[in-house]
Amino acid sequence: MTSAMPMAVAEHWRAGTRLYAFDEPEDAAIGRWLSRLSCERVVHAPGLFGHHALEDGGALDFPAGIADHLLLFVVSGNCTVTGDCGELALDSGGIVWIRPHVPFSMTTQDDRRTVVYRFRLAADPDTDACLTPMNFVREAWEIRAILDILVNDLPAALPYREERIRGLLVVLFTSIFRRRGERTDSGVLSLFARGGRAVHGGEHH
């Protein structure tokens, strides 16, 4: 698996619109993104959210990405996701989070059934630019429980529904940020954000 971003892609991110402060600490950038989470941003529609069995030997290709954040949690089986940052093989318990409009493709094995949780969140252009194009975490079984609760609560009309779902979203994404931060190969901020902060903010994380 390749973890380094190709030079052409790195230049593309550096040339993008600057939607965040270069000298903003990582916690503040992520905090701003988390503060914009809401129940209304969950794309809750048939085929876009919930538990799905993928076709054996299937392939999906999105050369322009999709308009929303996409999370895929592998419940059983495995799949391979290919994006700008290389090829990623995900086994059961793994989760990948792909930012809006990031090109990617996905394949499954011919001889093994793969079941995933599919979760989509509407984009927030003002804060999305601070995130890496693709994040992944292995052995993230604690996230499965959060997705189970979201699937049950989203269609319900119970008291404090919006507050509860927002709280679940915060727990979901902070869990990914924490687990991602434990890895030594890269952080949760985009290459452009991290590079800008190093040059202009004098900070290294």
Image: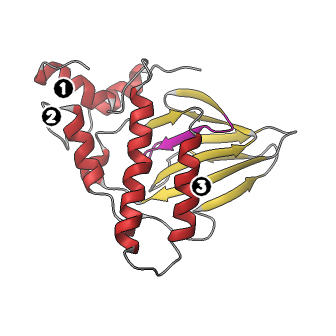
Dot 1, how many residues are within 10 Å of its Cα: few (below 14), some (14-19), or many (20+)? many
Q: Mark 3 falls on what kind of element?
A: strand
Taking the spot 50% from the left edge, 57% from the top edge, the residue there is: 120
Distance Cα–Cα, label 2 vs label 1 = 7 Å
Q: How many marks?
A: 3
Q: Position of residue 45 (x, y in %)?
A: 56, 71
Q: Position of residue 121 (x, y in %)?
A: 44, 58
Residue extent of the magenta highlight: 91-102
Dot 3, how many residues are within 10 Å of its Cα: few (below 14), some (14-19), or many (20+)? some
Label disc, if present, on residue 24 of the rendered structure: 2
- The earlier-in-sequence mark between 2 and 1 is 2
Label disc, if present, on residue 197 of the rendered structure: 1
Taking the spot 67% from the left edge, 50% from the top edge, the residue there is: 116
Q: Position of residue 17 (x, y in %)?
A: 22, 41
| Amino acid at pointer 2 | Glu
**Residue topped by disc 3:** 118
The quadrant of the rendering that contains the N terminus is top right
Q: Quadrant of residue 31?
A: top left
